[in-house]
C-alpha cells in the first residue's frame, strides 16, 4: 500500500500532509528507507489525516532527518498514533535485525516527533502564513480522522485523507469539501461498490451462529483501529439482544485493547446514538464472555478453550501479529471459519487466502486452507465509488472546482475513479505519479 505523503508549498512556507509508511510487498517496504524527496528541516508543519500506519508510519524518520516544525492532528489521532508507532518500531526492529540493517528509526526519534505534536479540534483555523491557513474537518473514517482544508491565495484545496463509509455504528458521517478549487481524494475503492451495510450485521450473525453449530473457531483478522471497535460494538449489541449464544470470545491484541481505551476516552467524537447508549450505562466494547488477552500467556491459553469460540486478533491482513498463530492452528479445520472484515492488500497472506489459495506458508510451515473463508465488505471503513462521487459532487457545487487528483488506490481503482469524475463533473481528474509536482 502506498504511504500517504504530500508536500504543499505556498510562498516560502512548506507543509506536509501525512508521512505514511509503504506496506504490502517487500519492494514496497524497501521504499520506506529511501530519502524523502524534500528537506524535512524546511517543513513548517505536518498535518495528519488520521493514525493508520500508511499515513503516520514514517513520522519518526522525518524527525530523524531534521523535521522540527509542528505536528498537527486531532487529540485522538495523536493518542492513537503514539500508541501504534512503538508497536511498529518493535516489528521493524525484528525485521531489520533479520535483514542485517538498521531499523527505520529509533525510540529517540519517536519520542522526538511526539514532542512536536499539537492537538487541534475540528473547525479551528490554523494560521500558517500571511495568506495561508488550514482547518480540519471530520472524515468519519476512524476516531479523530480528518479531511484537511488549506486556504491560500484565494483558493481552497482539500485533502480527503481516508473517507469513511457512512453510516457507521460509532462515528459521525464525514463533512464535505465546500467550494473547493482542488481536491486530492483517496481511491482505495474507486472501482467498487460495497455490500449493502444493512445486511452486514445479519451476515455477521449468521457466520457466528453457523460456526457455533459446527463447534468450530471463528477467526477474525482485524485492524486494531476502528474495525475492532465496530466489531465489538456489534457483538455487544447482538449479545444484549440475545441474538447469539453466549460463547467464549477473545480480543487477542494488546494494541487493539490500548486503542479501545482511547475510544473510551473520547466519547464526544461518537455519533448521537453511541453517546446515548453510553449515557444509558452500557459499555460499548465489553460484554459477558469477552476476554481481553494482553499477555502472550493469555493468548496461548485460548488454545485450551474447546470450541466453539471467536478470536479477534491482528493483523487485519494476516501480515503479522497473533492471528498467525491461530490461523496456523485452525485454517486446516473444516469446522472453523476465517472471516475478513477489511481490505486485503496485494502480497499479504490475507490476500492469498482471500483469492483462494489452498496452501499457504505460516512461520515457514505449509498450512492447508480447509476452513470456510468469508468476507464482509460492509465493514470497510473506506468510502466506495458511489460515496466518493457524492462527496466530490458537493465540492463541485458553486463551479470553483478546477482539478481533482485520485490517490491512495491500486492503479485500476484510481484510474477508474478519475475517468468517472471527468465524465460526470467535466473537471480534469488525474492519477499523479510518485514525486510529481503540480502548480495550482
Image (cartoon, rainbow, N blue to C red):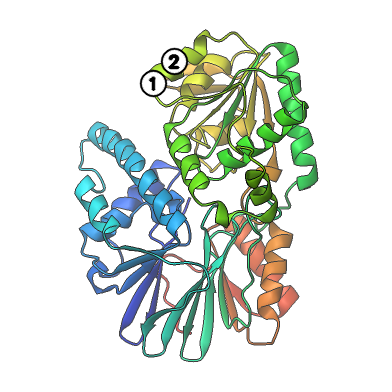
Residue displayed at 69% across by 30% down: 374
Who's the residue at 26% across and 59% down the image?
115
Residue at 44% x, 15% y is: 300
Residue 97 is drawn in which quadrant?
top left
Eyeballing the image, is 328 above or below 127?
above
Q: Is residue 46 above or below residue 143?
A: below
Of residues 400 and 286, which is closer to you in this image?
A: 286
Residues under labels 1 and 2: Cα distance?
6 Å
Query: From the viewer's perspective, is residue 6 above or below residue 27?
Result: below
On residue 296, the disc is: 1
In the rendered structure, the answer to whether residue 31 lies left or right of residue 174 reads: left
Work out which residue is located at the far front of the displayed protein and give it.
280
> Disc 1 on helix, strand or loop?
helix
Q: Position of residue 72 (x, y in %)?
A: 39, 66
Relative horizontal placement of residue 34, taking residue 370 as reference (left or right): left
Residue 299 can be seen, yes or no: yes
| Residue located at (68% from left, 68% from top) | 391
Residue 211 lies, in percent from the top left, at: 71, 19
Asked whether 56 or 145 is in front, the reply is 145
Label 2 SS: helix
Q: Nearer the viewer, residue 210 or 189?
A: 210
Disc ID at residue 437: none
Question: Where is mark 2, residue-wise?
Answer: 300
Asked if the residue under mark 2 is in contact with the one under mark 1, i.e. CB atoms within 8 Å, the reply is yes
Locate residue 288, reporting x and y percent: 62, 23
Residue 410 seen by the camera = no
Amino acid at each position: 500500500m502506498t504511504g500517504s505523503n504530500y508536500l504543499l508549498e505556498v510562498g516560502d512556507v512548506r507543509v506536509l500532509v501525512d508521512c505514511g509508511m509503504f506496506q504490502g510487498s517487500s519492494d514496497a517496504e524497501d521504499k520506506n528507507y529511501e530519502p524523502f524527496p524534500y528537506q524535512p528541516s524546511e517543513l513548517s508543519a505536518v498535518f495528519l489525516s488520521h493514525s493508520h500506519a500508511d499515513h503516520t508510519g514514517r513520522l519518526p524518520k522525518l524527525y530523524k532527518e531534521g523535521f522540527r516544525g509542528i505536528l498537527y492532528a486531532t487529540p485522538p489521532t495523536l493518542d492513537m498514533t503514539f500508541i501504534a508507532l512503538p508497536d511498529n518500531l518493535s516489528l521493524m526492529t525484528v525485521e531489520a535485525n533479520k535483514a542485517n540493517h538498521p531499523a527505520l528509526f529509533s525510540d529517540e526519534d519517536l519520542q522526538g516527533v511526539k514532542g512536536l505534536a499539537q492537538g487541534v479540534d475540528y473547525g479551528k483555523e490554523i494560521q500558517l502564513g500571511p495568506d495561508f491557513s488550514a482547518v480540519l474537518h471530520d472524515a468519519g473514517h476512524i476516531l479523530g480522522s480528518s479531511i484537511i482544508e488549506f486556504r491560500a491565495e484565494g483558493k481552497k484545496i482539500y485533502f480527503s485523507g481516508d473517507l469513511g463509509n457512512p453510516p457507521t455504528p460509532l462515528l459521525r458521517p464525514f463533512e464535505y469539501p465546500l467550494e473547493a478549487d482542488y481536491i486530492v481524494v483517496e481511491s482505495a475503492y474507486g472501482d467498487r461498490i460495497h455490500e449493502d451495510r444493512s445486511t452486514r450485521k445479519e451476515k455477521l450473525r449468521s457466520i457466528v451462529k453457523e460456526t457455533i453449530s459446527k463447534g468450530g473457531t471463528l477467526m477474525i483478522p482485524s485492524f486494531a483501529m476502528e474495525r475492532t471497535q465496530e466489531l465489538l460494538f456489534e457483538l455487544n449489541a447482538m449479545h444484549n439482544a440475545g441474538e447469539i449464544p453466549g460463547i467464549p470470545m477473545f480480543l487477542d491484541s494488546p494494541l487493539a485493547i490500548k486503542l479501545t481505551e482511547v475510544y473510551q476516552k473520547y466519547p464526544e467524537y461518537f455519533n448521537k446514538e453511541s453517546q446515548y447508549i453510553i449515557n444509558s450505562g452500557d459499555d460499548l466494547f465489553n460484554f459477558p464472555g469477552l476476554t481481553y488477552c494482553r499477555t502472550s500467556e493469555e493468548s496461548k491459553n485460548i488454545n485450551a478453550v474447546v470450541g466453539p469460540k471467536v478470536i479477534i486478533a491482528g493483523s487485519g491482513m494476516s501480515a503479522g501479529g497473533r492471528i498467525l498463530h491461530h490461523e496456523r492452528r485452525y485454517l486446516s479445520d473444516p469446522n472453523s471459519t476465517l472471516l475478513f472484515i477489511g481490505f486485503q492488500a496485494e502480497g499479504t497472506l490475507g490476500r492469498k487466502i482471500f483469492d483462494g489459495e489452498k496452501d499457504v506458508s505460516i512461520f515457514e510451515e505449509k498450512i492447508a486452507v480447509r476452513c470456510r473463508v468469508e468476507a464482509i465488505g460492509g465493514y470497510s471503513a473506506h468510502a466506495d465509488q458511489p460515496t466518493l462521487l457524492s462527496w466530490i459532487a458537493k465540492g463541485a457545487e458553486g463551479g470553483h472546482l478546477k482539478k481533482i487528483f485520485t490517490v491512495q488506490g491500486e492503479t485500476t481503482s484510481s484510474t477508474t475513479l478519475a475517468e468517472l469524475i471527468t465524465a460526470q463533473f467535466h473537471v480534469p481528474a488525474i492519477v499523479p505519479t510518485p514525486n510529481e509536482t503540480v502548480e495550482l
